[in-house]
Image: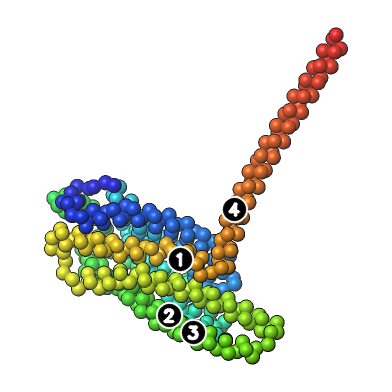
Amino acid sequence: MTIKAYEDSLMQYSDYIAHKQILLVVSPILLVIGTLGNVFSFFILMNNAKKASTYSYLSVLALMDLIVLYIGLFRHWLGLFVLNIEDMNNVLCKIVKFLGYFSSDTSVWLIVAVTIERTIVVMVPLKAPRFCNARNARITIATIITFFFLVNFHFLWSVKLQELSYNETIISKCQAKPQYSYLVENIWPWVDAGIYSFVPFSVIIILNGFIIQNVISAKKARAILRQHSSFSSTGSKQRSQGEMSKKITFMLLAVSIAFLVTTLPMVIVLIYTSFAEDAGDDYSLTKRMLIETIAEMLMYTNHSINFFLYCATGKKFRNQFKSLICCCSKKNFRRQSTVNFTESYRLCKVNETDMHRIHVQKEDDGVQL
């Protein structure tokens, strides 16, 4: 970990040291877990996208979570050793700012979209096939991506790399251009807080309340109907579909509840920093930085753990993950076996050739004698 010149005065505070240590230790752990989890999730969910539109949302969510981790978390971790990526040149400044906001907003609203879909399935199951299908899922995903692309597009011209003086040291910092400083520094934090935290947080809480209430009521109703239902093939098929829908519902409840728990500290921090006065001294600044870092690590945890939530709540997902691992292992085994067989065959042919040469030599020796 590199201590930059302008950080010398801050390193005397334990809060700042703790902030640096959290970034140093926690970041790579979340990066490894999140990378492997999101890659596995993407491939498994894409294979099931035709079976349920929910999986289309979750597969794109895995990709967006990967972008969030590498644009946000990896950038913070790398900044401990070298210059922050967005502070290296003007092009990276614009692209990193844009991708950071775009991917995080899209990720959160994919969770909102899939929660809305699941609410429709649970509340009005007879009308659900009309709205919750693969075609509408693709349209919704494309709409979300396009909307947040346009919303955050202004970062490609509203920010630039600027030189600032801090603790008598000149540093390069990616900040808003003077003519856009009020928009980026005063208005946009509130817009982003609403888009990323406040609105989705509220929507997911309300919809999850409806889902949980309906699941409890449906469970009681099924218990009554089970006593009078016939065990026909049609009934078995309906029960099978109901079980699948119930499992998907529990999976999405786990994802959305995890989102609420891991982003709640960030919501509180955003509200606090919006109304609190700016830190007037280094001690207050380092304390605030530590709190923000803890909240950010929890936020990045949300983008890293969905794979484990899928495994914990979905037996089918676990089985497909095992099949994927076993399939890769068998392919490697077969490839290695093929190589070994080819090598053995080659050696056998060489040995046969050598033996033939020796036999011919012995016959020649016999003739000469």
User: Looking at numbered disc 2 in the image, what kind of residue is underneath it?
Assistant: Asn
User: Looking at numbered disc 3 in the image, what kind of residue is underneath it?
Assistant: Ile
The disc, 2 or 4, on the residue closer to the chain's N-terminal end is 2
Give the residue pinned by disc 2: 208
Give residue 287's quadrant in the image: bottom left
Question: In front here: 155 or 349?
Answer: 349
Which of the labelled discs sits on residue 216, or is there none?
3
Mark 2–mark 4 Cα distance, whole angstroms, equals 37 Å
Mark 2–mark 1 Cα distance, whole angstroms, equals 17 Å
At x 62%, y 81%, the residue is 239
Q: Secondary structure at mark 4?
A: helix
Question: In front here: 137 or 209?
Answer: 209
User: Looking at numbered disc 1 in the image, what kind of residue is underneath it?
Assistant: Asn
Mark 1–mark 4 Cα distance, whole angstroms, equals 22 Å
The disc, 1 or 4, on the residue closer to the chain's N-terminal end is 1
The disc, 4 or 3, on the residue closer to the chain's N-terminal end is 3
